[in-house]
Amino acid sequence: MAGQWSSAQRNGAARSASRNARPFCVAENDGVVCGFAFGGKILWTGLSTSSEVSSLYLLEAIKRRGVGRALFGRLLAELARRGFTSTGLWVLTGNLPARRFYEAMGGRTGDTRIERKDEVVLDEIAYLWDDLAAAGPSRG
């Protein structure tokens, strides 16, 4: 199946994350990695938070099953456990499913930016969680 990580890849990613003191959460389905989330101290510019979520990825086949909520919730809890008080991330403005997900997880919109990388233009919006101790899915 496309998208599978070997045990060596999974262990290598976890070692890399721990060397950099960045929380790394993995979701597995029947022993196969189906999603991951990374975060930690700010590496990218423009966020007014104490930490960042640098990646959240799920295989398409696992989406809309609660795995993303659980994975993202674990990452937010781990950031809080490590002493971070707030977090944020950048998402493409046109990625409406991701934006709805972050809003459902309690994120609020922040600044927007245009990033240019060679011929590619990225129109992005920040999502922010101001209080990691209270972060998580919105109720209602």
Image (spheres, rainbow, N blue to C red):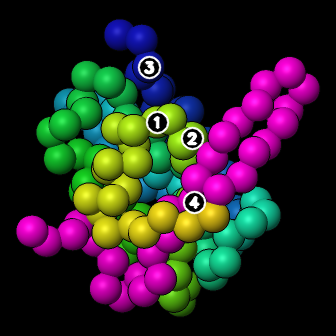
Q: Which mark is residue 3?
A: 3
Q: Amino acid at mark 4?
A: Ala
- What kind of element bears circle 1? loop
The residue closer to the viewer here, 117 or 20, is: 117
Find disc 1 in the rendering and name its residue: 95
In the rendered structure, which segment of residues is drawn in magenta? 112-140
Q: Is residue 38 above or below residue 107?
A: above
**Circles 4 and 1: CB distance less than 8 Å?**
no
Mark 2 Cα shell of 10 Å, populated few (<14), some (14-19), many (≥20): some
Q: Which mark is residue 92?
A: 2
Which of the two discs, 3 and 4, labels the residue nearer the N terminus? Answer: 3
Dot in front, 3 or 1: 1
Q: Amino acid at mark 2?
A: Leu
Task: Say left or right for 100 vs 43.
Answer: left
Dot in front, 2 or 3: 2
Q: Compute the Cα span from label 2 to label 3.
A: 22 Å
